[in-house]
Each structure stands twice: as structure tokens, then as C-alpha cells.
Image (tube, rainbow, N blue to C red):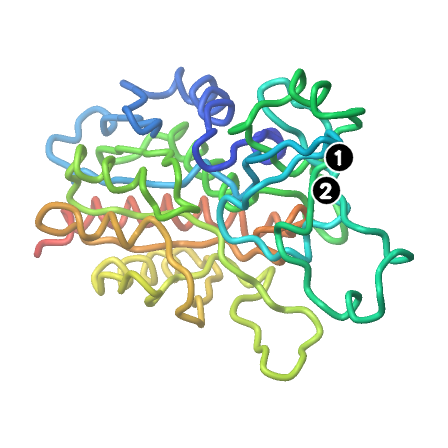
């Protein structure tokens, strides 16, 4: 399964090459052009099916990168110090296996054992500088033969099935969106597609800025994942999306307000094709849509997201029904846009 393959690959922000190469190999037989820009974005063009004269130029975007770590120090003991790349809760780091660098050096994130901690230490959330990566090296000299400063570390997690059509694994944010884009590129669609697998979204949506400027599309649809919180409710937490309730449509977030016509077209496409959908019911966070919508004179944009529990952790959970419904809704939206002749602004 492509989603499983992509999710298991390491691809921390700034180090997306292995993910990009896997996607390139998968889509090459189905597209007209593809290139990698200076930022590292993979840009894929697919012309509309034969007989379609003028069609809207639609940018589809999904980011390849995942949150992770970058090595910034090696101790005399051979343990590695690191910085976080992207937004990660320190509580999910402890004791997690990782792979480091192009050689996939195995390691584990360590911390002082509970038996050695003072009572007050046990009550505090650990800071990043209190954590380290153990690669089994006897000392600094041996560690330096295995890793270098600037190497990236990604969670070492295999995707597994669980429950009723659920998958558990790392980097569904946003390899799930990438897998949706790949599937769309394999289909015959009535619009000119400019699909972009972007880089560095987790550290400020940097790849999206240059890609949108280069392509200057008529409109854009961003495929993402978003937080699901349908677990036992605690005070102050309400579910924002639910697994199994279909793809989520974004109304707004910290950097973006959805274009009204795109939102209406997404709703119509879902309802005409009896595709269950929901709304992303909170405004925190941001996606590539913010920077894409501000490119040049402005680009009308919308976001469709796959609900995902435990985002930015080594054990996030999605439901396959939502994943496939996102493919269906995105395809139906492209047909709807073609029927409308674009957004007719």
C-alpha cells in the first residue's frame, strides 16, 4: 500500500529526498511533466483529458515533510543532543526509537531513569536539553564515525492495522495527503493539474511560497491531515473532528480563510456524490494554504483534511474510510470546478 510505504520513509523538514523519489517513481507513468525546484518541491503537471479545450489550472498541494529532530551536539559519552524540527510535544519523545541520517543509524531517545530521579523531577515536563539520543556508541569518537552534526533523526515506526479499518503510524501528516494526490494523478480529470508535493511545511510552509509563485494557478486545493480528538473527553477539550465522519473542510485557521466559492463547490461535490464530510471546528494551526493564497495577486484556495488522532507523534491514527473519501471528494471537486468553468470571479 502506497500510504504505508510513504509513511514509513524518513522525511523530516529539509530532508524530504527519499519521500520525493518514491513519489516521483510512482507518478511518472501518469503525468506529462515533472521537476524538482530549488527548494526541493516536486512539481507535477498533467494536462486535461483529450477534447477539453480550456480548463481551469488547478494547483493541488500536499506537503512531504514530517516533524522530527536534527543533531546539534555529540557528548563525550557518545550520546547525541538534538533540536526539534517542527512542533513536537516533549512528552511523546521519551524512549522512542529513531533512525538517523542517510545510513538509518538506529537510536533511542533517552532520559534519566525514573529510579534515579528526585521526587520533584518526576513532576516536571522535561525540556529538550534534558533528552539525548543513545546510539550505543562507547564515546564521542565512535559516535562521530556514525553520525554528523546536521543529520536528521526521524521516528522509527512501522505502520500497523488496528481496530476497524484504522492505521497507526508516524507521518500521516502529511504522507496521507501525498498518497491522495498520487491517486488523483493516476486518474483522467477534466482540468489542468499542477500537483505540488511541498517541502518544509512544518517549519513555516516555505516550499509552498515558491511553488505557488512559480505556477500562478487559477485556484488551489490543499490536501492535509487535521487533529481528531474523539477520545475520552476531559475538561476543556471538545472533539474538533471525528474519525469516520469523512474529510474535514476548513473554514479558517491562523493564517487563512477559505475562499467562499471553493468551499461551496466542495460542499456541492460532496452532497451530489453522497460523500460524508465534516468541518474542521477550530482555528489553531496553519497549512500551506495561507502562503499559497497570498501569492502574487492572490490565489483562491481551500483545504480538505483527513482526520488524524495524535498528530506529530510516532503513533498517529487515521481511518481508511476517511482517506478514500478524501480521494473521492477531491476528484468530485475537480469535476465540479470544470463544470463551472472555474470560479468565474
The residue pinned by badge 2 equals 109
Work out which residue is located at the far front of the displayed protein and give it: 76
| Percent coordinates x, y for residue 201 in the rendering | 39, 44
Dividing the image into 4 quarters, which one contains the C terminus? bottom left
Work out which residue is located at the far right of the displayed protein and give it: 115
At horizontal 22% and vertical 61% (from top left) the residue drawn is 259
Q: CA distance from mark 2 to mark 1?
A: 6 Å
Towards the viewer: 62 or 92: 92
**Is residue 68 shown above or below 253?**
above
At horizontal 13% and vertical 52% (from top left) the residue drawn is 298
Dividing the image into 4 quarters, which one contains the N terminus? top right
Q: Is residue 205 left or right of residue 225?
A: left
**Is residue 70 shown above or below 143?**
below
Work out which residue is located at the far bottom of the displayed protein and give it: 235
Near mark 1 (Cα within 10 A), the count class, few <14, some 14-19 or many ≥20, is many
At horizontal 55% and vertical 31% (from top left) the residue drawn is 152
**Tag 1 secondary structure:** strand
| Percent coordinates x, y for residue 341 in the rendering | 14, 47
**Tag 2 secondary structure:** strand
**Is residue 146 shown above or below 53?**
above
| Percent coordinates x, y for residue 132 in the rendering | 69, 42
Q: Is residue 249 left or right of residue 342?
A: right
Towards the viewer: 254 or 187: 254
Near mark 2 (Cα within 10 A), the count class, few <14, some 14-19 or many ≥20, is many
Q: Is residue 250 left or right of residue 162?
A: left
Q: Return the disc, 2 or 1, that comes first in the chain's sequence.
A: 2
| Percent coordinates x, y for residue 295 in the rendering | 16, 47
Question: Which mark identifies residue 134?
Answer: 1
At horizontal 15% and vertical 53% (from top left) the residue drawn is 343
Q: Is residue 21 left or right of residue 309?
A: left
Amino acid at each position: 500500500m502506497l500510504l504505508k510505504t510513504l509513511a514509513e520513509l524518513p522525511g523530516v523538514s529539509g530532508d524530504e529526498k527519499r519521500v520525493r523519489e518514491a513519489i516521483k517513481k510512482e507518478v511518472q507513468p501518469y503525468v506529462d511533466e515533472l521537476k524538482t525546484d530549488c527548494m526541493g518541491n516536486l512539481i507535477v503537471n498533467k494536462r486535461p483529458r483529450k477534447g477539453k479545450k480550456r480548463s481551469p489550472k488547478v494547483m493541488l498541494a500536499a506537503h512531504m515533510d514530517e516533524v522530527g529532530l536534527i543533531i546539534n551536539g555529540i557528548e563525550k559519552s557518545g550520546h547525541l543532543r538534538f533540536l526539534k524540527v517542527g512542533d513536537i510535544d516533549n512528552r511523546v519523545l521519551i524512549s522512542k526509537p529513531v533512525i538517523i541520517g542517510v545510513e538509518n543509524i538506529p537510536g533511542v531517545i533517552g532520559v534519566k531513569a525514573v529510579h534515579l530521579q528526585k521526587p520533584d523531577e518526576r513532576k516536571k515536563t522535561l525540556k529538550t536539553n534534558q533528552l539525548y539520543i543513545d546510539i550505543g556508541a562507547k564515546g564521542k569518537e565512535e559516535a562521530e564515525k556514525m553520525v554528523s552534526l546536521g543529520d536528521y533523526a526521524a521516528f522509527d515506526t512501522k505502520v500497523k492495522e488496528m481496530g476497524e479499518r484504522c492505521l497507526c503510524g508516524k507521518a500521516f501528516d502529511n504522507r496521507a495527503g501525498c498518497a491522495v494526490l498520487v491517486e488523483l494523478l493516476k486518474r483522467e480529470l477534466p482540468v489542468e493539474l499542477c500537483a505540488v508535493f511541498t517541502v518544509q511545511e512544518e517549519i513555516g510552509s516555505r516550499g509552498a511560497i515558491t511553488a505557488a509563485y512559480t505556477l500562478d494557478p487559477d485556484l488551489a486545493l490543499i490536501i492535509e491531515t487535521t487533529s481528531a480528538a474523539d477520545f475520552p473527553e476531559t475538561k476543556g477539550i471538545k472533539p474538533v473532528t471525528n474519525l469516520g465522519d469523512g474529510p474535514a473542510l476548513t473554514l479558517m485557521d491562523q493564517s487563512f480563510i477559505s475562499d467562499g466559492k471553493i468551499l461551496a463547490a466542495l460542499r456541492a461535490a460532496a452532497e451530489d456524490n453522497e460523500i460524508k464530510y465534516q468541518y474542521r471546528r477550530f482555528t489553531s494551526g496553519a497549512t500551506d494554504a495561507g502562503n499559497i493564497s497570498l501569492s502574487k495577486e492572490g490565489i483562491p484556495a481551500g483545504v480538505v483534511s483527513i482526520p488524524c488522532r495524535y498528530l506529530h507523534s510516532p503513533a498517529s491514527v487515521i481511518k481508511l474510510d476517511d482517506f478514500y473519501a478524501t480521494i473521492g471528494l477531491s476528484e468530485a471537486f475537480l469535476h465540479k470546478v470544470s463544470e463551472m468553468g472555474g470560479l468565474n470571479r
